Amino acid sequence: MFSKFFFKRGIPILTLMLLSVSSSNAQKAVGSPKNEKIMEVAVILFEDYETLDVFGPAEIFGRLVDQYRLNFYSLEGGIISNRHGVPIMTEKLTNVEIKPDIVLIPGGLGTRSEVDNPLLINKIKELSESSDYVLSVCTGSVLLAKTRLLDGKRATSNKRAFSWVTSQNGSVDWDKKARWVVDGKYYTSSGVSAGMDMALGFLADKHGIEFARKVAKEIEYNWIEDKDNDNFVTQ
């Protein structure tokens, strides 16, 4: 037994060591490829984001520490909270000096006001244009649609908010039926939990379907692999 604990930023070093070992074991369990570039997933946050829109994909990408690194950004930086009372510490979007590999845009009630925030929309456009991939979850697609980058492209969104989302940009080929849609580098998903299916779909496209299935098994998640059919179809 240790007679005393050593701490780093308030966390026992022993705990950090155990977390490191656990993360390493999870990485090996899904059979991740070696010597790949670590891709940054830049999560763009705003007040009243939807919890699972963020933490669903974060669980999937975040456990693959040799392939992906999560960073959280907002317009002003600092703590961003949602209606569930879940706070996330963020960096200012202006601090993004190198283009992110992946931009992730969640949805939530906050999109109802942020859709009319030109500062945020312009920053999303700037980062999306320079990134390799853009992923939106739920009503996050309305923010992406406002940039006009989805004009002429297929996309989907939360089926319960579908009428509102589609009313914001009629130049998008909105898919009422899909669980998630891929059009070039743009991935858009249906509501809330569909973001996890989309994230696993992204892994399947990037690393192969068996890799994605192993990740889903590691988190004991019943992955809906059929991206073209959503149980929550809009009328």
Image (spheres, grey):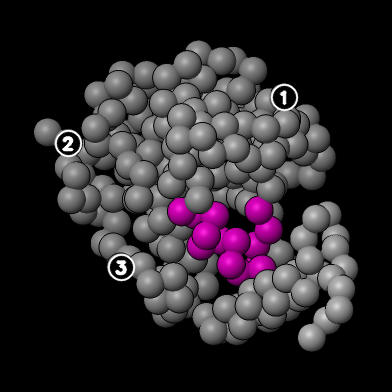
Query: Where are the magenta residues, as a range?
Result: 56-70
Number of numbered discs present?
3
State which tag comes first along the sequence, 3 or 1: 1
Is residue 183 visible in the rendered image? The answer is: no
Q: Are marks 1 and 2 in contact (CB under 8 Å)?
A: no
Is residue 44 visible in the rendered image? The answer is: yes
Question: Magenta stretch: residue 34 in it?
Answer: no
Q: Residue at x 50, y 13 (%)?
A: 116
Residue ID for mark 1: 76
On screen, 220 above or below 45?
A: below
State which tag comes first along the sequence, 1 or 2: 1
> What is the number of the mark on residue 222?
3
> What is the number of the mark on residue 234?
2
The mark lying in front, picked from 3 and 2, is: 3
Residue 51 horizontal/vertical position (percent): 46, 42
Residue 53, by quadrant, is top left
State which tag comes first along the sequence, 3 or 2: 3
Residue 223, by quadrant, is bottom left
Residue 169 horizontal/vertical position (percent): 37, 21
Mark 1 lies on a secondary structure that is loop
Q: Residue at x 33, y 37 (%)?
A: 157
**Amino acid type, mark 2:** Thr
- Classify the position of the C terminus by image quarter: top left
